[in-house]
């Protein structure tokens, strides 16, 4: 299949869902246009969760603005503060100590594990398979404890600061030992889960060939992250990030672009994340974790891109008199929202939420003020 | 028949029904606490919570005015369902054998159909705020397909309930006719008598196949995972029950537990030849069968995702074919 084309001529009925719906973790409006129970077209509307973080950041001191970005998302909070600090560091020319870079990568990969596990658990929940959902949540709990140990909190860690990471996030022998043990536990649990999940014929019949997003359409819609890789495109920004140069890992792809491919991509990426965490621990250099040797100066608008659990995250701002100006943030879910509308076409109404969930939506991230420039 | 016998019979019937009702209130709790929660390695709710404490709590809650075009009928439907289950249970007692029109399989199937039709009506009469009534500016400039008919999500439930009547619950009714084929009568008294002479129907090849089909039908009629299509969380949420609150929701909870017990009692009568009678050891067998069904259903549902049309139709067809095979073997 090259492309899915909505067929507006023969639609019988509209079924609106939300903005409040138990299967959706966050508020959004979904209009499904159906014949019998087959979805022919879909429209997703966001906007009920907009908080205007960029607008609040305007005029704040850089350090405060960076801390505020962590509030954009409860799942990839560390990614936002990391990228925001990275933007400032690129603009101000701050050199980040190697040990701090390693700790940032460690936090990022732990966050990837926690995000992917949340995705797998939520996917099982939408399938109404509560047992598998609970089991993945138990696995995720180990990751949350590790994040809490390093960052001090389960969700808002405040790990990155301009010039490195906070000294309280430094790794001592006790923390390293707990991380090693945690990775062993997670790897064993995840292996067991993946074996059982893929061997379950009933589950496979629910997810195979459902919510297909053709590769050509994914590229046209500028889909990013695991959702793009699940269509067979080996595109991972981590391979081009200097922070990830010391580490060896594989780009995971799957060929079909359906729910099954998306779930498997994230499960296999979790194994790669475990691999990276182990390499971080093995190669962790000695030295300081934050560089204070820099001066605040005015900068032009600076861009920074990093690969977060859901795809490519973009932050940009300029600095004037130590304050943030012209802030723009583009989250990966925003790029993937078009994919959600197409993924559910051709499937049953029951599978529509599943097709949306397969794109790993995060509507607190997505609800940003955007200007569409048609070219 | 003397007056004393009639009075004693009526009292025995009332006491039997009350005891069965009390036992039935524990069944949803046993399923959730001792099966689902144990499999999912969590503590689970107190065993009395889903079947007893929750309905009591709901009974004292303030009711909401349901958003329904016919609120009177809508509110009456859970009561109708409860009465239907009550009448089925009464039909399974030895006292009901004196009223052949009631204690026949045709009457029981008719009553079960009323139960199923209630779900269609509940879905069709419910207009919750979760879909069309949500105050959201859909029909504005830029929106697609602005002139299309808009449907409530409960309408999907109503259509699915119709589908379940058409083919979903078919296996259960075929399984019920297995004992009829063997005994040659639709009257419960005759079926029981036949089994007292020839041994339980369950221990025949036909009976074993029909028991498997009955169990599938039991899960389908109870709308349990994986057959909870009419109240799938991912789209229709609670489906037909969405607008029920306070005491009406309490009645829905109670009816579900009561139906669990009643269907198990129906199985005991048709497949083992034991009617529901408090004053015989048979009542213990009824309770054991109810517990076995609940445990088996809990295990099966804990490891299954919800079926959609794609899975439901083949499962229903295969189960129906097995039911036909059981009847054919019973006739032979």
Image: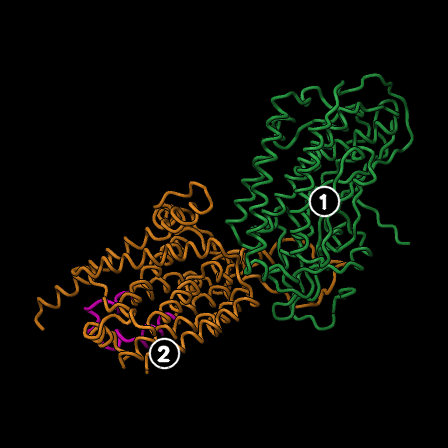
Q: Secondary structure at mark 1?
A: loop
Work out whether B164 lies above or below A201: below
Q: Colour of chain B?
A: orange
- Where residue B71 appears, as percent x and y from the top left, is 46, 62
Is residue B196 visible in the rendered image? The answer is yes
Q: What label sits on residue A143 in the rendered view?
A: none
User: Looking at the picture, do discs 2 and 1 lie on one chain?
Assistant: no
The residue tagged 1 is A310
- Is residue B264 toward the left or the right of residue B120 in the image? left
Q: Quadrant of residue A279?
A: top right
* Quarter of the C terminus of chain A within the rendering: bottom right
Mark 2 lies on residue: B327
CB atoms of marks 2 and 1 within 8 Å: no
Secondary structure, mark 2, is helix
Please provide percent x and percent y for residue B235.
58, 58
Is A308 drawn above or below residue B121 in the view shown?
A: above
- Chain letter for mark 1: A
Q: Which chain is green?
A: A
- Answer few, some or many: residues within 10 Å of disc 2's Cα (few below 14, many 20 plus, some between 14 and 19): many
Q: Let me know if residue B139 appears in the view.
A: no
Q: Residues within 10 Å of mark 1 (few under 14, many from 20)?
A: many
Magenta range is: B89-112
């Amino acid at each position: 299949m090259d492309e899915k084309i909505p067929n507006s001529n023969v639609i019988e009925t509209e079924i609106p869902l939300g903005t409040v719906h138990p299967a959706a973790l966050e508020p959004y409006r979904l209009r499904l246009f159906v014949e019998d129970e087959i979805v022919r077209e879909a429209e997703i509307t966001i906007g009920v969760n907009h908080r205007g973080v960029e607008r609040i950041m305007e005029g704040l001191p850089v350090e405060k603005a960076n801390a505020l970005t962590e509030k954009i998302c409860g799942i990839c909070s560390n990614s936002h503060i990391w990228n925001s600090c990275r933007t400032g560091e690129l603009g101000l020319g701050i050199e980040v100590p190697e040990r701090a870079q390693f700790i940032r990568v460690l936090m990022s990969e732990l966050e990837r594990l926690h995000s992917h596990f949340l995705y797998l658990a939520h996917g099982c929940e939408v399938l109404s398979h509560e047992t598998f959902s609970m089991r993945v949540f138990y696995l995720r709990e180990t990751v949350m404890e590790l994040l809490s140990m390093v960052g001090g909190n389960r969700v808002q860690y405040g790990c990155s600061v301009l010039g490195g990471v906070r000294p309280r996030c430094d790794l001592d022998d006790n923390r390293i030992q707990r991380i090693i043990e945690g990775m062993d536990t997670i790897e064993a649990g995840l292996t067991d889960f993946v074996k059982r999940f893929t061997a379950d014929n009933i589950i496979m019949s629910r997810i195979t060939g459902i919510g297909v997003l053709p590769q050509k359409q994914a590229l046209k819609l500028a889909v990013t992250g695991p959702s793009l890789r699940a269509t067979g495109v080996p595109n991972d920004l981590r391979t081009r990030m200097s922070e990830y140069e010391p580490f060896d890992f594989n780009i995971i792809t799957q060929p079909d672009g359906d729910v099954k491919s998306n779930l498997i991509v994230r499960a296999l990426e979790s194994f790669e994340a475990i691999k990276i965490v182990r390499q971080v621990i093995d190669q962790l250099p000695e030295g300081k974790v934050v560089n204070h040797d820099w001066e605040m100066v005015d900068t032009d608008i600076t861009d920074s891109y990093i690969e977060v659990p859901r795809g490519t995250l973009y932050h940009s701002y300029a600095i004037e008199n130590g304050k943030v100006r012209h802030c723009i943030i583009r989250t990966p879910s925003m790029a993937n929202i078009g994919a959600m509308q197409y993924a559910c076409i051709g499937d049953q109404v029951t599978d529509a939420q599943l097709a949306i969930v397969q794109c790993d939506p995060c509507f607190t991230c997505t609800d940003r003020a955007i200007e569409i420039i048609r070219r | 028949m003397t007056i004393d016998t009639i009075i004693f019979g009526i009292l025995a019937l009332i006491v039997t029904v009350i005891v069965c009702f009390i036992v039935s209130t524990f069944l949803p709790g046993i399923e959730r606490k001792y099966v689902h929660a144990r499999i999912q390695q969590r503590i689970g709710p107190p065993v009395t919570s889903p079947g007893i404490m929750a309905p009591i709590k709901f009974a004292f809650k303030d009711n909401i005015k349901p958003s329904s075009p016919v609120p009177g009928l809508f509110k009456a439907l859970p009561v109708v369902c409860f009465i239907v289950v009550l009448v089925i249970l009464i039909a399974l007692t030895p006292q009901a054998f004196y009223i052949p029109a009631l204690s026949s399989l045709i009457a029981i199937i008719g009553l079960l159909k009323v139960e199923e039709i209630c779900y269609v009506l509940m879905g069709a009469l419910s207009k919750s705020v979760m879909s069309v009534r949500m105050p959201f500016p859909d029909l504005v400039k830029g929106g697609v397909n602005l002139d299309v008919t808009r449907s409530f999500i409960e309408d999907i439930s109503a259509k699915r309930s119709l589908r379940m009547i058409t083919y979903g619950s078919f296996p259960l009714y075929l399984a019920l006719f297995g004992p009829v084929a063997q005994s040659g009568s639709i009257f419960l008294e005759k079926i029981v008598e036949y089994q007292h002479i020839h041994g339980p129907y369950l221990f025949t090849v036909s009976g074993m196949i029909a028991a498997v089909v009955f169990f599938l039908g039991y899960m389908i009629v109870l709308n349990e995972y994986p057959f909870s299509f009419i109240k799938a969380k991912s789209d229709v949420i609670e489906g037909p029950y969405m607008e029920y609150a306070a005491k009406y929701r309490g009645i829905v909870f109670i009816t579900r537990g009561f139906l669990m017990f009643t269907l198990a009692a129906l199985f005991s009568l048709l497949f083992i030849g034991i009617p529901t009678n408090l004053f015989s050891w048979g009542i213990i067998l009824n309770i054991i069968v109810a517990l076995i069904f609940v445990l088996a259903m809990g295990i099966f549902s804990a490891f299954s995702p919800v079926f959609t049309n794609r899975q439901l139709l083949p499962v229903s067809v295969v189960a129906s074919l097995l039911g036909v095979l059981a009847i054919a073997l019973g006739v032979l």
